[in-house]
Image: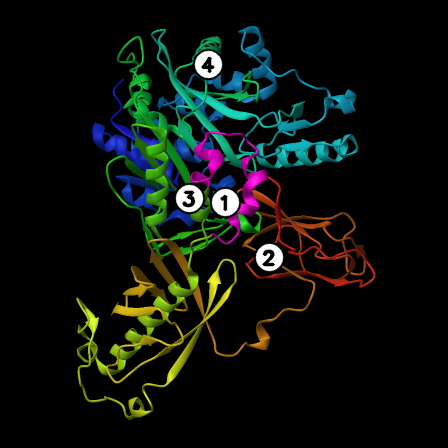
Amino acid sequence: MTITTLLVANRGEIACRIFRTCRDLGITTVAVYSDADADALHVREADLAVRLPGAAPADTYLRGDLVVAAARAAGADAVHPGYGFLSENAAFAAAVQDAGLVWVGPPVKAIELMASKTRAKELMAGAGVPLLAPVDPATASEDDLPLLLKAAAGGGGRGMRIVRELDALPGELLAAAAEAASAFGDGEVFAEPYVERGRHVEVQVMADAHDTVWALGTRDCSLQRRHQKVIEEAPAPGLDEALRTRLHEAAVAAARAVGYRGAGTVEFLVSAEGRPYFLEMNTRLQVEHPVTEAVFGLDLVALQLRVAEGEPLPSPEPPQPSGHAVEARLYAEDPARDWQPQTGALLTLEVPEGPGLRLDTGYTGGDTIGVHYDPMIAKVIARAPTRTEAVRLLARALERARIHGPVTNRELLVRSLRHPDFAAARLDTGFYDRHLADLTAPAAGRDPATAALAATLAEAVRGAEAVRGPEAVRGAEGGRGAPVATPAPARFGAWRNVPSGPQRKRYRSEPDGTEHEVAYRTPRTGVPEPHETPGTRVLTATPDHVTLEVGGVTRHFAVTAYVDRVHVDATDGSYTFTALPRFTDPATHTAPGSLLAPMPGTVVRLAEGLAAGVAVEAGQPLIWLEAMKMEHRILAPASGTLTALHAVPGHQVEVGALLAVVQEDPAATTPVPHPVPEETA
């Protein structure tokens, strides 16, 4: 059957990605959207769109009946699930086919067999795929530690716990089962040995209905936070040919064991000694599929559609790979504060274009990052002949990108790519456990003080032009665009008030909170110049661009102001400042021990017995919030007494909402330095 109209049962970046291939193939596209996504990019890019009433995923994108009805209403003849949501839901795949629609995915039976990690492991054992021996939690001993607890029915880090102490096992089992039940509707949890310093290596497979199965090389996805991938690359570096061959053969065996068709990924854990162990098979397209596309010169979505139409793969053997590709996931989150997801208006998103660079995103400047869905903004992919070149290209592209709005992990990505361990391909899933503090510490070479100066000068020029007109402030002397004295009558008498006197401006650096005070003066030319900043000379200054000579080196700064926020993009990176009043407002301070919501979200539960008047210990989890598909724990900042409790399970809270107050007992233990939420998934 030829597909003419395709509905994508998903949102954001992956929906836009699939639509791109459909346009190339002449296929009409249909989007579905929640109320929260009414103005989303994937809706704007689709030929047709159908509303799913509501905002929460459970009411919209996870309602298979509504999605099938939407496909019928729009006249679609096929459904592509993307990844996440219903992409690995066998009942949904069956419902699509029962409705007479083409399912762009694997057979229902294959999804069912791989849906439970415990059943999948049993099947793989029979196919000769290498496995970690399971551990029965009821009989686990000290010799079995450390253990990894995992949800049988899901992924993405939900329901996953590392257990290093036997006494902690019962509690962690209960917590993992509760989270698994909440996330996947199935509380089954299993245990297996936790491999220290293991690498996450996976094999992309593509299979048709004509007995052809391709193993499309390897990918390394070891750089993870909270068991979710951050940076991926293909091919996985540092594997010898014998290991690559074994991984390819195991992946093909896994696909054949379930009669697989379409795109899928077989994931392995590779120990430090080079031994591979089967983790799971993802019966869908992966987030990181672009790196495989880049090195094989393929469009995996086009191949999915071809296979769904019943056509064979183009050849019995896959094409030969060439070069190296690296992908970085750009998230709206703050790595220095326990990876807190961030929300708000994404004011600007501009990533450099050029040979070897690719941007996959579901956002454009002006869109809003909400609370209901994953905080990934975009994926930036770089391909080059060698790994070193690809990594360098990607790091520089991220560094040069203009991203204005919520805090992102952009700087962490750049510094990760340039870290000596990453450069030397010393990769394992504990990378951020070891290096996060260094990667989020103030970076050498950055110069926020000079960036703040540029922001101040641009603002001063903007103010001068608003009062005197741009003709009174224009360039000439001292080189191209340099400021010159251009006499112009003052439009308001106030400009006669000692224009050359020094003025001061205060900024707070985001997100680290460092304050900067900048002194400048505005001579009769109307063009500001730095004050108390020796060795710095203004070459040009406009409301949106400042060029300074600092220590004999010319530096350029692009300045963009949004109300009280200023973004400065420079060669050495990007800076975000909040303009501060000259004097601190005492009303902005909160009572000591106040626990504020760090993000908008839903209160899902409270610590057992939590009520005003009870004693709490420093670091004790008190409140659980759910936001952006993740669960976060709010910890007691110190040992003492809970004097107020405003959080109620089931209630939505806004960022900054007062959840509780802990009055510290001075004789108790040392307070927790930063009472921020701890992400538990």
Amino acid type assigned to the residue bearing label 2 in the image: Ala
Q: Residue 425: within the magenta?
A: yes
Asked if the residue at tag 3 contacts the one at tag 2, i.e. Cβ–Cβ closer than 8 Å, the answer is no
- Residue 202 relative to residue 6: left or right: right
Residue in front for this viewpoint, 144 or 563: 144
Q: How is the image coloured?
A: rainbow
- Residue 2 seen in render: yes
Front label number (4 vs 1): 4
Asked if the residue at tag 2 contacts the one at tag 4, i.e. Cβ–Cβ closer than 8 Å, the answer is no
Q: Secondary structure at mark 3?
A: helix
In whole angstroms, how far apart are the C-alphas of marks 4 and 2?
44 Å
* N-terminal label among 2 and 1: 1
* N-terminal label among 1 and 3: 1
Asked if the residue at tag 1 contacts the one at tag 2, i.e. Cβ–Cβ closer than 8 Å, the answer is no
In whole angstroms, how far apart are the C-alphas of marks 3 and 4?
32 Å
Q: Position of residue 498 (x, y in %)?
A: 33, 90
Amino acid type assigned to the residue bearing label 1 in the image: Ala
* N-terminal label among 4 and 2: 4
Disc 1 packing (10 Å; few <14; some 14–19; many ≥20): some
In whole angstroms, how far apart are the C-alphas of marks 2 and 1?
20 Å
Q: Residue visible at 71% across and 34% down?
A: 172
Amino acid type assigned to the residue bearing label 4 in the image: Ala
Looking at this rendering, what residue extends furthest in the right direction?
Answer: 667
Disc 3 packing (10 Å; few <14; some 14–19; many ≥20): many
As drawn, the label of residue 56 is 1
- Residue 136 relative to residue 628: left or right: right
- Which residue bears the numbered disc 3? 414
Q: Secondary structure at mark 4?
A: helix
Q: Secondary structure at mark 1?
A: loop
- Which residue bears the numbered disc 4? 251
* N-terminal label among 3 and 4: 4
Asked if the residue at tag 3 contacts the one at tag 1, i.e. Cβ–Cβ closer than 8 Å, the answer is no
